[in-house]
Amino acid sequence: MQVTPTPQAPRALIIGAGIAGLACAVRLRAAGYQVTVLERHAQPGGKIRTVPSAAGPIDAGPTVLTMRHVFDDLFATLGQRLDDHVNLVQQDLLARHFWPDGSTLDLCRDEGRNVEAVRRFAGNRSAAQFQRFSRRTQRLFAAFDQPMMQAADPRLATLTTTVLKQPGLIPAMAPLSTLRGMLRTAFDDPRLRQLFGRYATYVGGSPTHAPGLLSLIWQAEAAGVWVVQGGMHRLVGALSAVLRTHDVNIRTNAHVARVEIQDERAAALCLEDGTRLPCDVLVHAGDPRALATGALGPALRHIAQVTTQVPRSFSARVLSFAATPGRADLAHHNVFFQGDAEGEFRDLMAGRIPAHPSYYICALDRGQGTDPPPVERFEIITNAPATDDTTDPEDLTQWLHQITQQMAHFGMTFSPTPTVQTVTTPQAFARMFPASLGALYGQSPHGTFAALKRPRARTSISNLYLAGGGTHPGAGVPMATLSARHAVEAILNDQTSMSPSAPTATRGGMSTA
């Protein structure tokens, strides 16, 4: 569907060409807006980024898609099919897990096979516990999907009503328990508690402090995982290409200096090179903490103030490199756990680089139905605390030697061995994404009501809206993409109520009612 802007079409400016900014551009363009996206880096994508290698571009951010329906819906907004733009390979094997004692556990997309895998791994009692855990998390995901994730402005009162209407949901939530505490009652085997506790790290938190409700993240993965052939950056490339064919202007190397406010509305963006861009609607699709800290002008310091008052999520040290692995039994997703399940999180909560971290290893060229090449592309992620320091750490050589030796205990070696030049640190993330403090997931997910404290799409400035992983419904590629839908639905509702001539939308789930 080609949408041609009319001379009277409202002008929408979007700050940030990460997945949320691009998704906002798709939905606003479908609604008839003139859209310009401004990206401070040389390429769109935000945290969906790559580093070069002799084997080709290597992902240095998200590695797979879950909640595929979110992206099918996004492309359909402009009359496109996701499958016409990227090749997606659904993974039968969701993740392969390794422990220091030599035990391994594969989890796949079939629950019955998972039950049998757990039975072989830890016995009949653990298999029964897994079945109960799976039913419990299915119920939680179904209960909170619509009133929380799909809702643009979730309210505690609405969530309370949802809970009270479903007897037995409160015990399933374990409202007074951390994820660690909930898993202690769910599983006898400490390895299974360790495995499902790691889902707290998907949103930058610790199972020792995150609420038990986060156990439902398992269901987002169990419902399906897809690999984008060539890497996640292919999704960004596809969205960018579709937008350009629909006359959306994506300006890279565009540094926004400040937002110009007139009559309590965002009137224009002023770039560092002196360019002034007027707007009718402005979407900030970066970390909202940038507004609260005055990075885009003192007039916006009152926006998203909560981001300066609550702790930040974890960050990571990320290795992206090409090599030949020393063991052949890797899947696309691999997790290597350490024996001390809680030591890593004690270090992280104390603001220290973990002495004995677990490793997430993505073998980017596997899980695609073909044999991997002799030299493969890898992304290794270890948790690290966020930091306000933007200078390079001095311990990288020692740290890399240490974790290389720790991985070797699993038989996990690489030729050539990765070097410090392959590492992206929290300090580097802090430089790339100003005001983020290097946190990869925005605010910390710790605390019973942490999810309700995230900034929403609407702000106190009537034509300024927020989107991205730092806003509701949260971090991760699907959640950030959903945030764009929430922002554009708010825009269309607000613009329609203020101006009968504003464009309307009937596609992609957007409503102007």
Image: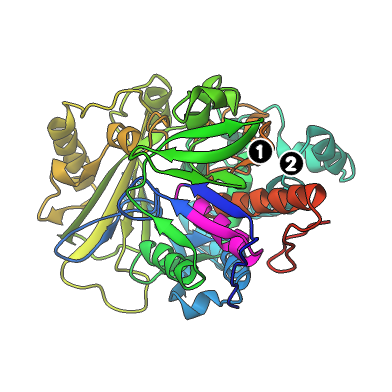
Q: Residue at x 48, y 24 (%)?
A: 294
Q: Which residue is mark 1?
A: 456
Q: Which mark is residue 153?
A: 2
- Name the kind of residue labelled 1 in the image: Arg
Instruction: Tell me the crowding category of disc 2: few under 14, some 14 to 19, or many 20 or more residues within 10 angstroms, Cα based.
Output: some
Q: Is residue 192 visible?
A: no
Percent coordinates x, y for residue 458 in the rendering:
68, 39
Location of the N terminus (image quadrant): bottom right
Spatial CA span between label 1 and label 2: 7 Å
Which element carries disc 2, helix, strand or loop?
loop
Which element carries disc 1, helix, strand or loop?
loop
Q: What stretch of residues is rendered in magenta? A: 16-36
Picture quadrant where residue 93 is located: bottom left
Q: Residue at x 78, y 36 (%)?
A: 155
Q: Residue furthest left?
A: 416
Q: Is residue 477 visible?
A: yes
